[in-house]
Image: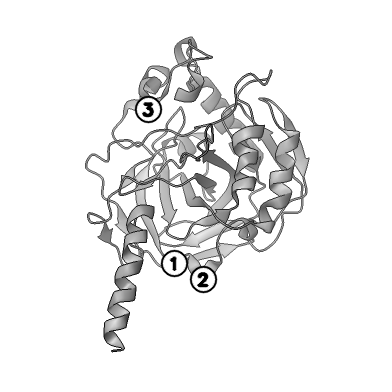
Amino acid sequence: MELLFLVLLSLHIASTATEGDKEWCYLSQQCDLPECEEPRLWETVNAECGKDNQSPINIVTNKVKYKKDLKRFSFEGYENAQSSPWNIKNNGHTVKVSLDGSAKISNGGLFNQYKAIEFHFHWGNKLGSRPSPGSEHSIDGERYDMELHIVHKKESFSSAKDASNDKEQLAVLAFFIKIGAENEKYAPLIEKLNDVPTKGNEKTMAALPLESLIPPEKNLTGYYRYSGSLTTPGCNETVIWTIFKEPIALSENQMENFWKKLYFTEDKTLLMTDNFRPVQPLNDRVVYHSDGSILLSPANALLVAPTLIYLMSLLFQ
């Protein structure tokens, strides 16, 4: 059943991504691939991309609403490496790692249990001396260097029809990634990027525990929640999004493996950079937050620290 779902999902995405013989791409690709449709025109590739509940979005922190049932997640199997090797692939848009569904999530305001089926990344570039951000979601207009998406499907789907029409078919956990200290836990994965530099390259690697790639579970109680879509065509509006407050840190050298060693093309003519979709209108949707999960933008967070120090000094005078 797991394999059937993945095959059907892949066929659906492949067919919708070339609707009308049009191909989609990111804006960073269009100069070299002028026939492809960049994000503002994705609805010409698939009509779903022009609907009202699209992702990603900008989260405005003074407009989010508290929802009391957004409690702590339950992570099952995240502490163990899956029994089979990971499949890692450069699909011409990102690097994707396929999973066997043995890791699961529940609670966290979800009404079902979900199996982890894949994860992938979105990032910016470093064409000059300073990196530019590449996260898909933003907080008060500020974006992070990268974003990790761990994609889960509902465990209880019963047919292909159910899977395609279910507005809660997928639960995606999104994690911001920032430049910081060297992250040894990511070293095996980043090293494997050297084996999949170009579109179509595919290799296996020893599986890692998913928990090794994300912040400690105790730090995952703060998050945002909204209903949205896949961020690539066919843009299906079947996703429950969770954006966590706690970011992941990678060193700049580690991030350069994404910026400078991966290519959109088979002939290494076009570096894979800026592979993110711009934020979409929120329209009439509401973004909710869990208890204590108001996440300030990176710029505003820097302004808060001196204020806190000043207030603490007043308390101890």
Choose the circle earlier in sequence order: 2 or 3.
3
Amino acid marked by disc 3: Cys
Query: Mark 2 and mark 3: span between their CA atoms?
Result: 36 Å
Give the quarter of the image for residue 265.
top right
Q: Is residue 267 left or right of residue 306?
A: right
Marks 1/3 in contact by CB < 8 Å: the verdict is no
Neighbourhood count class around disc 1 (C-alpha, 10 Å): few under 14, some 14–19, many 20 upward: some
Task: Provide residue 271's location: percent of width, then percent of height.
Answer: 60, 26
Neighbourhood count class around disc 2 (C-alpha, 10 Å): few under 14, some 14–19, many 20 upward: few
Tell me the residue that label 2 is attached to.
Answer: 218
Tell me the residue that label 3 is attached to.
Answer: 49
Picture residue at 44% right of the left edge, 36% below the top: 230
Q: Is residue 172 above or below residue 54?
A: below
The quadrant the N terminus occupies is top right
Residue pushed farthest bottom?
A: 317
Marks 1/2 in contact by CB < 8 Å: the verdict is yes
Determine whether the residue tagged by mark 2 lies in a helix, strand or loop. Answer: helix
Foreground mark, 1 or 3, reads 1
Q: Is residue 311 above or below residue 191?
A: below
Tell me the residue that label 1 is attached to.
Answer: 221
Query: Mark 1 and mark 3: span between their CA atoms?
Result: 31 Å
Most foreground residue, 218 or 170:
218
Q: Is residue 113 above or below residue 49?
A: below
Task: Provide residue 149's location: percent of width, then percent of height.
Answer: 52, 46
Task: Provide residue 53's location: percent of width, then percent of height.
Answer: 31, 37
Give the quarter of the image for residue 203.
top right
The quadrant the C terminus occupies is bottom left
Q: Tell me which colouring the rendered structure shows.
A: one colour
Whether residue 61 is visible, yes or no, is yes
Task: Provide residue 289's location: percent of width, then percent of height.
Answer: 33, 60
